Amino acid sequence: MTPGKELLFCALGGSGEIGMNVNLYGCDGKWLMVDLGMTFSGNEYPGVDLVFADLEFIERERENLIGVVLTHAHEDHIGAVPYFAEDLGVPLYATPFTAKLIQAKLDEAGNAKRIKLNVIDTLEPFDLGPFNLRYVPLAHSIAEGNALVIETPYGRIFHTGDWKLDDEPLIGTPATSEELTAIGDSGVLALICDSTNVFNPEASGSEGGVYRGLLAEVEKHAGRRVLVTTFASNVARLQTLGEIAIATGRQLCVSGRSLDRIIGAAKVCGYLKGFPRTIEPEAAMNLPRGDVLIVATGGQGEPRAALARIAEGHHDIELESGDVVLFSSRQIPGNEIPIGKIQNKLAADGVVVVTDRQSHIHVSGHPGRPELLELYKWIRPQVLVPVHGEMRHMREQARLGREAGIPRQVVQKNGDLVRLAPGKPGKFGEVRAGRLLLDGDIIAPADGPGIVMRRRMALNGVVMVAIDAKGRAQVAGLGLPLDEDYDAFCSEAAADVRTALAKLKGGAAKDRENVIEAARLAARRAATRWSGKKPQVQVMLAEG
């Protein structure tokens, strides 16, 4: 669908879920994409690492897409760039720190020379077709978090990206209340706003406050080896930890490829000034226990990250009873089990585990209710469109905005076509908004037969039936916990298959599809009788 003389909004990812942000704006025959993110796979997709938004809709409109503008460098906003930017065939736009991390991703993927990456190193406006854009710096848990002011012939958009309010951000200089009020004074048609923390009745808190909390916590554990795990992308937190290492007289050891990459990019872009020289794990292990501060990835329970390997004793860094691990990060919903496993393993070894529930060692990068209300007061939009949240978050933000006096609220989900202007704003259609999965080296649809089969196999197991040219059947099962009954099951299932085939008469007995279906049903009934499960059944029929 090509936009007419109108202003449209459509999310292909990030609305109705947290992560995988892909937003489209349509105007005067052109589409603009804001962010191209991904999310990490959960238990619903066995063996899959990454999940992407299905871009089928905008790929069909490729000739009308004029660019991809990235708000900041978190994976849920840029993680899909190396996989899809080349196929989209349009330029990318990002501020320097974000561009540095994107460039590294493109270099690693081997397609950097085929993708135009434009670095926007000022806050001056730039034009893309019918859109005039400028970055507005806002505080977040990464360097160069930005909102976008998007000017169109039909009204002005304020697209928040991910944000918070912070009087002591430590990294970067966010827009002031006066600057945001001035944007509101110029007239804002629609506020497209982060919903993640709408249920939090308090403000998210300051990075400066976390500095003081972490400093007090590290000082409390003098003489012990202290490890802090945090999001690698949180440059302000890394600045904090560097200053704490200096203040407490500890050497700083950093463990994790993503931390090395972020620190390198941050320094190139002028951040982390005064950051102490880091030491290698081997050197850290030779220091007295109270003389080292370790920063490691893996606070979300990632099995291959540094913290998981340290907890399992498979790393150069070792922790002993009495040592301390500080979880300076928020527990992302869905990660409770892997995080709990690591914390329990550490506790079993006598390691002291401290989280943000026990000490002020973390603050969120997303706005609580007081911050949302402040932004509403400054921006004063005519329309509020909640994004970046599950449906419960977006509905709640719509209610909050209505109570705060915003005239109209549009609650949408991935794939909804929303007309913002002219006329009354609201949904008027839908486009495809599915999911794609990175499975090894293959990008496949989440609802494709291969992935659906794997999910079913993971839940119920699989039974294989082999039928030779003389109609003799053999059965094997995988993933069925029959143990000592396994041989008896295979024998009985094979007998059931032979009985089912014997009942086929005339043409049915010679029809390949009939034979396969009869064998499949017989084997499945046997498996259900023995195990209570309904496994996937694969029948292999020899050519006769």
Image (spheres, grey):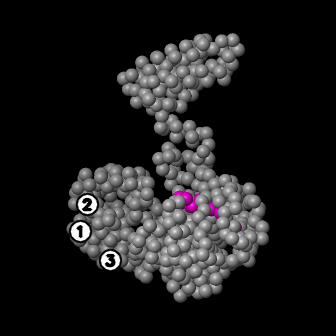
The disc, 2 or 3, on the residue closer to the chain's N-terminal end is 3
The image shows residue 402 at horizontal and vertical percentages of 54, 73
Q: Is residue 482 magenta?
A: no
Tell me: 281 left or right of 16.
Answer: left
Q: Which residue is mark 2?
A: 352
Taking the spot 59% from the left edge, 70% from the top edge, the residue there is 409
**Quadrant assignment for the N terminus:** bottom right
Residue 202 shows up from this direction:
yes
Mark 1 or mark 3: whose residue is earlier in sequence: 3
- The question of residue 10 being in magenta is answered with yes
Q: Residue 498's x, y, as percent? A: 55, 14
Local secondary structure at mark 2: strand
Q: Residue drawn 62% across and 77% down?
A: 382
Relative vertical location of residue 470 with respect to residue 401 in this rendering, above or below: above
- Give the distance between the C-alpha atoms of the residues marked 1 and 3, in whole angstroms: 15 Å
* Residue in front for this viewpoint, 155 or 134: 155
Q: Which amino acid, by three-letter code, is at mark 2?
A: Val
Secondary structure category for the residue under label 3: helix
Q: Which residue position holds label 3?
A: 212
**Residue 272 on image: x %, y %:** 44, 76
The residues bearing labels 2 and 3 have C-alpha atoms spaced at a distance of 20 Å
**Residue 82 higher or lower than 183, as above or below:** above
Is residue 251 visible in the rendered image? The answer is no
Magenta stretch, residue numbers: 8-19
Compute the Cα span from label 1 to label 2. 10 Å
Residue 390, which numbered label? none
Asked whether disc 2 touches disc 3, contact meaning CB atoms under 8 Å apart, the reply is no
Q: Amino acid at mark 1?
A: His
Q: Answer yes or no: do the residues labelled 1 and 2 have beta carbons within 8 Å?
A: yes
In the displayed structure, 542 sits above or below 64; it is above
Q: Which residue is mark 1?
A: 221
